[in-house]
Image (spheres, coloured by chain):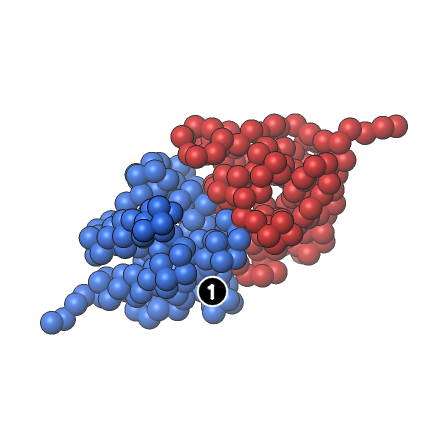
Chain colours: A blue, B red
Amino acid sequence: MVINNKEKFMKAALNEAKKAYNKLEIPVGAVIVKENKIIARAHNLKEFKQDATKHAEIIAIEKASKKLNNWRLNNCEMYVTLEPCPMCAGAIINSRIKKVYVGSKDLKTGACGSKLNLLNDYEFDTIVECEFGTLENECQTIVKSFFKKIREIKSGR
Amino acid sequence: MVINNKEKFMKAALNEAKKAYNKLEIPVGAVIVKENKIIARAHNLKEFKQDATKHAEIIAIEKASKKLNNWRLNNCEMYVTLEPCPMCAGAIINSRIKKVYVGSKDLKTGACGSKLNLLNDYEFDTIVECEFGTLENECQTIVKSFFKKIREIKSGR
């Protein structure tokens, strides 16, 4: 069975989310793609690094910028398992990423349309396209499963 | 002459902004203060690092988190010479900074009230206090002077 590129890249982001899951981090993964190749992969490391800026998207942007030696991530796309928060949506705008594919919505802090829409509702220099829904179920499931596990750990089961 | 603490800390942020100016970076500086002591100082390094996430505020949060070994910057205040963009305002919220003192407004991308207000207009977990106006003139002047210098360099004067 041929899976399309969007699913292939979101699967790579999900694979990153699983690494976060195994480290007891909120399981979010992101990859950055340029010319149909993954140039950066990252997962949430907020607890491990004890740094609230170390979301998957920020680390992926750091890695892609280093790889291209350019802060302008022109013609790059991001695949991310959970809708970016305001910090990460702002970083996506600042780094000139062209399009973001979001797996699962985040109704509480999502800044790509769910809680607010930083990508399109304000006239910043850049407009970032956004598409929801690639592997949405898998991306939702890993987050739900994580919080169930955390509740079990906390209740001593 | 006794200057008050707000001016003392904003002067330290301005001193950071000057370091950025001398590196031909947009001159923004930030310091983070806890219990009346500066625990982190940073300036914009976007061009030097070729990384759009390397704004003064993000680097200051990274440094403060490392110093405290805690992503929660409880009871910390930030002094920043220019109003934070959405990325940085989001990082301030995520890191639980209590209050931000902003020197100069940024009408184009300021996310603490000028272009939008991430700190107060949305019901995120944290509400961050914000106060404008400390050393506003000096904070405005360094940005204006920087763009004048850049125009002169570009026109070959």
Amino acid under disc 1: Lys
Query: Relative to A137, is B46 on the left or the right?
Result: right
Q: Where B135 falls versus A68 (above or below)?
A: above
Query: Relative to A130, is B45 on the left or the right?
Result: right
Number of marks in picture: 1
Residue B36 appears in which quarter of the rendering? top right
Q: Residue at x 65, y 52 (%)?
A: B67
Question: Which residue extends farthest front?
Answer: A156
Asked which secondary structure carries label 1, the reply is: helix
- Is residue A75 visible in the rendered structure shown here? no
Mark 1 highlights which residue? Answer: A63
Residue B29 appears in which quarter of the rendering? top right
- Is residue A39 visible in the rendered structure shown here? yes
Along the viewing direction, whichever of A51 and A67 lies nearer the viewer: A51
Say which chain tag 1 marks: A
Q: Position of residue A103 (x, y in %)?
A: 26, 53
Q: Residue at x 36, y 49 (%)?
A: A156
> Which quadrant is home to the N terminus of chain A?
bottom left
Q: Residue at x 57, y 49 (%)?
A: B70
Q: Position of residue B16 (x, y in %)?
A: 71, 47
Question: Which residue extends farthest left?
Answer: A1
Q: Residue at x 41, y 30 (%)?
A: B122
Q: Position of residue B92 (x, y in %)?
A: 53, 41
Q: Where B91 falls versus B119 (above or below)?
A: below
Dot 1: within a 10 Å radius of its alpha carbon, few (fewer than 14), some, or many (20 or more) residues? some
Q: Position of residue B125 (x, y in %)?
A: 43, 35
Along the viewing direction, whichever of A105 and B87 lies nearer the viewer: A105
Question: Which residue extends farthest right?
Answer: B1
Query: Relative to B142, is A110 on the left or the right?
Result: left
